[in-house]
Image (tube, helix red, strand yellow):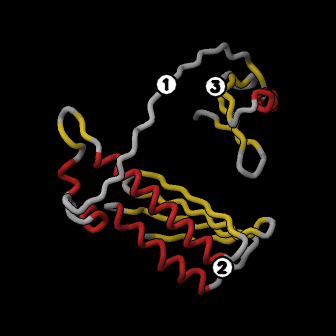
Amino acid sequence: MLIQIRGKNVEVTDALKSYIEKKLPKLEKYFHEVKEAVVTMSVQRGLHVVEVQLEGDGVLLRGEERRGTDMYGSIDQVVEKLESRVRKYKGKLYGKTTDEGPKERGVLKDRAMTEAFGTEEEAEVETVETPEVVRTKRFAMKPMTPDEAAQQMELLHHDFFVFRNAETEDVNVVYKRNDGNYGLIEPM
């Protein structure tokens, strides 16, 4: 696994690098092939922030942890979060059945899955109900600027707002970021 480690407003020491290189390979056992992992560390308002973006088997996995105590604790927590997420994802993929039978049953016997979950009899697959679409909304989209869309979103107390961009005539999404700012999603 290729691990890229970056620091924003923080020096990435050799000890931090080796700690990350020791912890992240725990996630490799859940994938056939992990292309790369990008780890970004920073200190924001006294909090130690670690963000990990991992690409494996065509799946993009992202996790972030903010702690006030130390960077090592943030690294431990983000790896734990990612491991929990990937277990849940794999449980959904391999634990559900369809009319044709269990999804990708043959893949369960693969070495990576056997290492991760043990044998099929030993596997504790989390039973998670798959969310479904329970409501559909239709509304007219008048053209507006991203700033107007952000104001409309705030008025509605929503986390995101879909609108037609007056400048490009494309459908865009404006959303509220964790840092309090706004993000804009534009189609390519």
Locate the C terminus and report the quarter of the image it occupies. Answer: top right
Instruction: Check disc 1 and give the amino acid type.
Output: Val
Identify which residue is drawn at 23% across, 47% down.
104
Q: Which type of secondary structure does the marked residue at label 3 adopt? A: strand
Kindly identify which residue carries mark 1.
134
Percent from the top left, x then y, of residue 147? 81, 32
User: Residue at 39% of width from left, 57% of height from top?
Assistant: 87
Q: Secondary structure at mark 1?
A: loop
Q: Is residue 66 left or right of residue 131?
A: right
Judging by the rendered image, the residue that carries numbered circle 3 is: 171
* 112 is higher (above) or lower (below) than 144: below
Q: Earlier in the sequence, mark 2 or mark 3?
A: 2
Disc 2 residue type (three-letter): Val
Mark 1 or mark 3, whichever is nearer to me: 1
Residue 105's disc is none
| Nearest-to-viewer mark from 2 and 1 | 1
13 vs 120, left or right, is: right
Q: Which mark is residue 12?
A: 2
Q: Nearer the viewer, residue 149 or 90?
A: 90
Q: Residues within 10 Å of mark 2 (few under 14, many from 20)?
A: some
Q: In 3D space, how far apart are the residues under numbered discs 2 and 1 (Cα atoms)?
A: 46 Å
Vertical position of residue 56 compared to residue 163: above or below:
below
Q: Residue 140: x percent and y percent?
A: 67, 13
Quarter of the image for the N terminus: give it: bottom left
CA separation, marks 2 and 3? 40 Å
